[in-house]
Amino acid sequence: MLKLGFSLTSFTYSRFISFLCKVKNFGLIERLLEDMVKYGAIPDMWSYNIYINLLCKENQLDRALEVMQTMLQKGSDPDVVTYTTVLQGLSKNGRYELAVKLWREMVGRGILPDGITCGVLVFGLCKRGEVDLAYDLSVDAMKRKVPLSVSVYNALIHGYCQAGEVKKAQAIEEFMRKNGCVPDLVTYNIELNYCCNNSMLEEAAKLLKKMERSPIKPDTYSYNQFLKALCKANRIDSAYNLLVNTMEKRSLCDTVSYNTMIRAYCWARETQKAYRMFEEMGGKGVEADVITFTILINAFFKKGRADLAENLLDRMLQKGLSPDRVLYTTMVDHLCKTGRIDQGQKFFRDMERLRITPDVICYNALINGLFRAFRVTEAMQYYEDMQRNGCHPDEVTYKVIIGGLIREKKLTTACKVWDQMMENGFTLDAALSKTLTNAIQSKDATVMNMSTGTNRL
């Protein structure tokens, strides 16, 4: 067009760049920007922001920062949208030091951050555990009359609760009230979660009562947190009363509620009560999930009731639920411990067929079962397979294998595995180490005696 005597305006360039951003044609965008520099045209703010947004989405953050510098050099100063976009990109990629530096540059240039900009950085810093820095930036924003949303306050409260600094969290809540920002359900649940996780049951109960009297009523999550705390404190009767007299009456029960109670009864070895709750779930419109079945199956295996455990597995499959890694591992472990190795291997193969990656606990259960059945070759094959599949042996794996190899008098292989164990930073316990050493010495003595006897002949 230029050769034909036509010239493109900044507006034309800008609209063309905006279109190219939609199709992510970075090469042509860069060529157009170079042409604009050559012919003295400057893209408008709208085009710059669209391009910078695209760069951030594609994780080309360094290039986005370069474009911002180009804007400053060309007299097209970045606005609050530009800064917010890049801050969000930097935060998502964990580049918080640069994000904070950019925030301070923005404020220093007289650009007032809005609540969204502040929130982007505060959320990221709180998630990283740098709550004090997030608080300082929030205070700086408030000094500049930037209104903060309830979600920003909640991020700070949650961050301080996570750090165990509950007094600071409470101070933030008081501060948000004074600034006309009303706490919401999330605020209360953050505080309730802190009380429950730290066994502060009286405080949690008071907070629930306060919520019940206020316009912000507890939800299912609120009650589930308190239910879990009561069970953890072994106050199972109180938990059951809460479930029946409050949660069920207010239709605030879900699968998590029942799973919490069933798990508590199983821990207390009251499997009959756990099973009864499981049977009641369906009648109350609450569906059992994989976790429900896993808890009960594991409990019945431990109690020696394999028949009930296997019956539950059949019921689970009839419901169309697929076992997860935890349940498969439970089944493999039980079958191997009871000598049904082939069935254990079948479950293991089912896992692989369904692309459920066995973890080290599952491998250990199978390898241990094979050694106990004197199937050493197969056990060692699984040991090789687990490493090839990226599953790293742990201390239990090495002890099981070395112990099994010693029993089978395969001492050369046992020493080789021992070397691998030490290379990976594990040590053999004193008893097994002594057993291996004694076995090696005994073998050496036998070989020496045989050699001496041959010489005498």
Image (cartoon, rainbow, N blue to C red):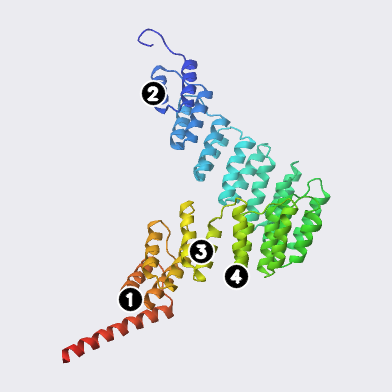
In the picture, the disc for residue 302 is 4
| Residue, disc 1 | 411
Query: Could you tell me how far apart the alpha carbons at marks 4 and 1 are, in whole angstroms?
Result: 34 Å
Residue indicated by mark 2: 31
Q: Earlier in the sequence, mark 3 or mark 1?
A: 3
Report the residue at 37% width, 79% height from top.
436
The three-letter amino acid code for the residue at tag 3 is Val
Q: Does residue 281 sit above or below 308 in this rendering?
A: above
Q: Residue at x 78, y 48 (%)?
A: 217
- The Cα–Cα distance between marks 4 and 2, rounded to whole angstroms, is 69 Å
Residue 195, horizontal then vertical, whole percent: 71, 59
Q: Nearer the viewer, residue 229 or 31?
A: 229
Q: Amino acid at mark 2?
A: Arg
Around disc 1, counting alpha carbons within 10 Å, would you say few (fewer than 14), some (14 to 19), or many (20 or more)?
Answer: some
Determine the CA span between mark 2 and mark 3.
61 Å
412, 368: nearer the viewer: 368
Q: Are marks 2 and 1 in contact (CB under 8 Å)?
A: no
Q: Is residue 406 left or right of residue 227?
A: left
Alpha-carbon span between mark 2 and mark 1: 69 Å
